[in-house]
Image (tube, grey):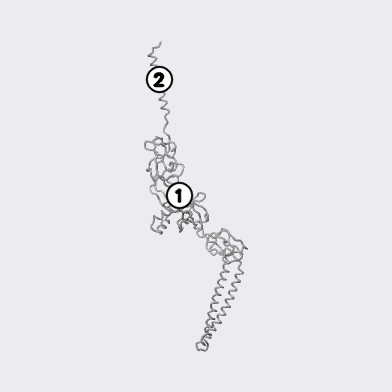
Amino acid sequence: MKSPGRFLIIMIMAAVFIFLSGCRKEQKELPSPPVVEVTEVIQKDIPIVRERVGTTDGLVNAVIRAQVTGYLSKQNYTEGDLVKKGQVLFEIDPRLFQAALDQANGTLAQLEAQYENVRANLARVKPLADENALSQKDLDDAIGAERSAKAAVVAAKAAVEKARLDLEFTKIISPIDGIAGLAKAQVGNLVGPAQIGELTTVSTIDPIKVYYMVNEQALIDFMKMFPSKTAVVEQAKKFVFELILGDNSVYPYKGEFYAMDRQVDVRTGTVRVAALFPNPNYPLRPGQFVRVLVTIGTKKDALLVPQRAVIELQGGYQVAVVGPDNKVEIRTVKAGDRFGTLWVIDGGLKPGERIVVEGVQKVKQDLTVNPKPFVSNTTPPAQETSSKLGEGQAAAGGI
């Protein structure tokens, strides 16, 4: 028979064994720190770029109209082709206008003959009047007749010139070099100032003009930065203009500032700005929608973080900062412009600090993490080329 003391010792040892086993099990089940991908805050100079929506237009758009009324007899150009200044685009039947010119020339010849007659008569009566062999009234009548005949000749010459111009206007020419549009009248149509108005349009498109809109506040802030209109224009001429086409490709030629409209649109609160772009071989045509990137300067020593590292929460911005002890601090920051796939941070971070890029949803304040270097699959920061602001954000700094 076992003694009670021995049995008690066995029970105590069993309880200790079970307790120690449970402790070891609990230690094994403690979670390991979550793995997150981190990167350092970058500091570098970046271009400041404003993005606008623009439309293309011809540098000069000449609307071709008929200046005399008549029937269209010829179309001498191919629609959509390049035409030269002075090239005949259309012809109106010239026969009526040639007849009018001939008639005007005949009338002029008659009046010139009459004028020569009265002028000769005045030359004969003047000596007689000087010798009192002719009354003063007869002399005055001769002088009046000469002046009247001379005025009639002047009027007849003007009629001949008008008839000659009308005949010339039967050949409708291009006033500029450019691309001619589709014809809006056909051979046989009656055209003229009171008939079919526009025949076609010729546009100069190399260089081509691009219009975009700037909000009123951005314009006011920009104008305040300079003492005079001349200084504003000189600064605007330093801007670099780029185009993004409808297929998201970058237009290969850069543009330059051209002009700013004289007024703000009362309906939209915006002012129209124009830039000029080279357009060899005419890949751009009037009426296209494009995105205009305007580089207005350089932001020095900007702090940059990947956009995916920034948490937007109720109008504010936060990032998860990993300290030297691998503990997380959720920090509120001041976010600025976008720079490609990065975000400019204007306050709340220091260069070189580590922030969480992947695994942000796993972290919280004071959590210990297992940081790994972030490997980006996108363009590296050194190759980012543009900072873009939406129209609503671009309140200051440039046009």
| Residue 397 locus on image (x, y percent) | 41, 52
Q: Circle 1 sits on which residue?
A: 392
User: Which mark's residue is nearer the viewer, 2 or 1?
Assistant: 1
280 sits left or right of 74 in the view: left
Q: Residue at x 42, y 29 (%)?
A: 30
168 shown above or below 372? below
| Residue 345 locus on image (x, y percent) | 40, 45
Location of the C terminus (image quadrant)? bottom left
Q: Residue furthest top?
A: 1
Location of the N terminus (image quadrant)? top left
Q: Nearer the viewer, residue 306 or 228?
A: 228
Q: Residue at x 38, y 41 (%)?
A: 353
* Picture quadrant of residue 236: bottom left
Type of amino acid under label 2 = Ala
Residue 258 visible in the shown view: no
| Residue 359 locus on image (x, y percent) | 44, 37
Counting residues from the start of the chain, the first of labels 2 and 1 encountered is 2
Structural crowding at the residue carrying mark 1, measured as other residues with C-alpha within 10 Å and reported as few (<14), some (14–19) or many (≥20): few
Q: Secondary structure at mark 1?
A: loop
Type of amino acid under label 1 = Gly
Structural crowding at the residue carrying mark 2, measured as other residues with C-alpha within 10 Å and reported as few (<14), some (14–19) or many (≥20): few
Residue 325 visible in the shown view: yes
| Residue 299 locus on image (x, y percent) | 40, 49
Q: Are marks 2 and 1 in contact (CB under 8 Å)?
A: no
99 sits left or right of 57 in the view: right
Q: Circle 2 sits on which residue?
A: 15
Q: Secondary structure at mark 2?
A: helix
How far apart are the two marked residues, 2 and 1, measured between alpha carbons?
71 Å
113 sits left or right of 229 in the view: right
* Picture quadrant of residue 199: bottom right
317 shown above or below 226? above
